[in-house]
Image (spheres, grey):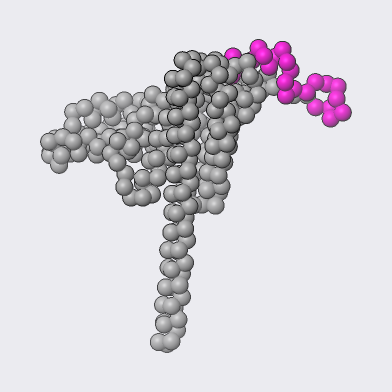
C-alpha cells in the first residue's frame, strides 16, 4: 500500500517537473519572439523617421521600407501557430483573420500596386501599424518579464481608441485608391474562357474586402476586452490619486461596474467594436471622478 502511494507521488513530481520545464521553455520562446518583433518594428519606425527627415517628403518611403515590412508582418504568422498549439490563449480564427488581413494589405495591395505607394493613406496605416505593434509587443515582453511599466500598460489600453479607426481609414482609402489601377490592368483576374473554366475578378474582390470592414453583430472585437480596459484605467488612475482605497473610489467603481453590465446587456445588437467605444468613453467619464 505504501509502495503504491510512493509510486504515485514520484509520478506526480515527474509530471510537475515536466510542466515547469515546458512552461519555462514556452515563456523563454515567447519572450524572445516579442523582443524580436518589438525590435523589428522599432527598426521600421526609425527607418521611416530617418527617410522623412532626410528627404522631407513621404514619397518613396514605402518602397524604402517594403522589404523589412514584408518580413516582419509575414513573420507574424507564427502567432497563429502559437494559438493553434495552445501556448497562447487566443482564438486561432481571430488571430488568423487579423494577421492575414495585414499580410493581404502588404503583399496584395501596397506592394503589388506601385501606383498607390505614395498615397497619404498608405503612410497613415503604416504609421498606425508601427505604433500599435511597438506598443503591443513591448507590453507582452514586459509582462512576460514580470516588470510592466505604467506607461506601457497605459498605452496598450488607451492608444487603440485613436489608432484603430485611423488604421481602418488608412486601409480603406488605400484599397479605394487601388481600384482604378486594378480595373485597368486586370491584375490577378481570370477571364472566361480559359482551360480551368473559372472566372475571378480581383477588382470585385477588393470591393468585397472593403465591405467586410462594415461592423456587424458577428464582428469580433480584436482589441483588449472592455472590462479589462476599464479595470486597468481605474487601477492606474487611483494609483496616482489621493483617493486610493477611499469610500468614494470604491463607490464609483461599484456604480461603474453595474452600469457597464447594463449597457452590455442592452447593446447586444451592436457590433462589439462599437460596444468597445461606448463602454470605453463611459468608463473614462466615470474615471475622471476618481
x and y percentages locating residue 8 in the rendered image:
44, 78
> At 28% from the left edge and 39% from the top edge, which residue is drawn?
150
Position of 178 with respect to 288 (left or right) is: right
- The residue at 84%/30% (across/down) is 196
Magenta region? 174-198
- Location of the C terminus (image quadrant): top left
In magenta segment, residue 187: yes
Which corner quadrant holds the N terminus? Answer: bottom left
Residue 87 position in % (x across, y down)? 49, 52
Depicted 219 relative to depicted 88: above or below? above
Looking at the picture, tell me which residue is in the foreground, 47 or 244.
47
Of the pair 264 and 181, the residue shown nearer to us: 181
Residue 209 appears anywhere in the view: no
Give the left or right position of residue 189, taking residue 88 as reference: right
Q: Which residue is drawn at 57% across and 36% down?
A: 71
- How many labels sit on residues? 0
Amino acid at each position: 500500500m505504501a509502495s503504491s502511494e510512493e509510486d504515485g507521488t514520484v509520478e506526480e513530481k515527474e509530471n510537475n517537473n515536466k510542466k515547469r520545464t515546458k512552461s519555462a521553455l514556452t515563456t523563454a520562446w515567447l519572450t524572445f519572439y516579442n523582443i524580436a518583433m518589438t525590435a523589428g518594428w522599432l527598426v521600421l519606425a526609425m527607418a521611416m523617421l530617418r527617410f522623412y527627415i532626410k528627404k522631407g517628403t513621404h514619397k518613396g518611403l514605402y518602397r524604402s521600407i517594403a522589404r523589412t515590412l514584408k518580413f516582419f508582418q509575414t513573420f507574424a504568422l507564427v502567432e497563429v501557430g502559437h494559438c493553434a498549439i495552445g501556448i497562447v490563449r487566443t482564438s486561432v480564427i481571430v488571430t488568423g483573420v487579423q494577421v492575414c488581413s495585414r499580410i493581404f494589405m502588404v503583399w496584395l495591395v501596397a506592394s503589388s500596386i506601385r501606383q498607390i505607394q505614395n498615397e497619404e493613406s498608405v503612410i497613415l496605416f503604416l504609421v498606425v501599424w508601427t505604433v500599435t505593434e511597438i506598443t503591443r509587443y513591448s507590453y507582452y515582453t514586459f509582462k512576460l518579464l514580470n516588470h510592466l511599466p505604467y506607461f506601457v500598460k497605459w498605452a496598450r489600453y488607451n492608444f487603440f481608441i485613436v489608432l484603430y479607426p485611423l488604421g481602418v481609414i488608412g486601409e480603406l482609402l488605400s484599397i479605394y485608391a487601388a481600384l482604378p489601377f486594378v480595373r485597368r490592368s486586370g491584375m490577378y483576374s481570370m477571364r472566361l474562357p480559359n482551360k480551368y473554366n473559372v472566372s475571378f475578378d480581383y477588382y470585385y474582390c477588393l470591393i468585397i474586402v472593403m465591405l467586410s470592414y462594415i461592423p456587424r453583430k458577428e464582428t469580433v472585437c480584436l482589441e483588449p476586452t472592455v472590462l479589462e480596459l476599464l479595470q486597468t484605467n481605474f487601477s492606474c488612475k487611483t494609483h496616482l490619486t489621493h483617493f486610493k482605497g477611499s469610500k468614494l473610489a470604491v463607490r464609483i467603481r461599484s456604480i461603474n461596474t453595474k452600469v457597464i453590465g447594463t449597457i452590455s446587456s442592452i447593446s447586444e445588437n451592436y457590433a462589439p467594436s462599437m460596444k468597445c467605444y461606448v463602454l470605453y468613453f463611459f468608463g473614462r467619464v466615470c474615471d475622471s471622478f476618481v
